[in-house]
Amino acid sequence: MDKEMNQAGSLLPACTVCGRPLIPDEIAMTRKMINRGARQFLCLTCLSRRFDVPEDVLREKIEEFREMGCTLFL
């Protein structure tokens, strides 16, 4: 798994398509949409392209999942 150092000095996984460092919500969304046990992740831009859905819709779904109490989005 590709990782890149973030500003805090910890390692973050990178998007397997474009290589951009990921934030926790992107990791959670990959696990929610593709496979809960995923070990490779996509950024929201690449997820939106893969599923042909606007990024704003994915952001709205993240908030919905969080409000529903999905433990992936804590």
Image (cartoon, grey):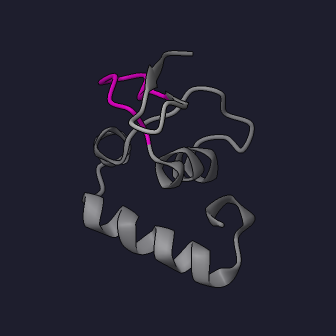
Does 71 sit left or right of 29 as displayed? right
Q: Quadrant of residue 43?
A: top left
Tell me residue 67's x, y (percent).
Answer: 60, 83
State the residue at coordinates (37%, 66%). Answer: 59
State the residue at coordinates (47%, 48%). Answer: 26
Q: Quadrant of residue 35?
A: top right
Give the residue at the far bottom of this rendering.
Answer: 67
Quarter of the N terminus within the rendering? top right
* Residue 40 sits above or below residue 24 on the image: above
Does 40 sit left or right of 59 as displayed? right
Is 3 or 59 nearer to us in this picture? 3
Tell me residue 42's x, y (percent).
Answer: 44, 36
Q: Is residue 50 magenta?
A: no
State the residue at coordinates (59%, 75%). Answer: 66
Q: Which residues are magenta?
A: 13-22
Tell me residue 34's x, y (percent).
Answer: 59, 42
Tell me residue 44's x, y (percent).
Answer: 35, 48
* Residue 34 sits above or below residue 18 on the image: below
Magenta segment's dominant SS is loop
Q: Is residue 17 magenta?
A: yes
Quarter of the C terminus within the rendering? bottom right
State the residue at coordinates (62%, 64%). Answer: 73
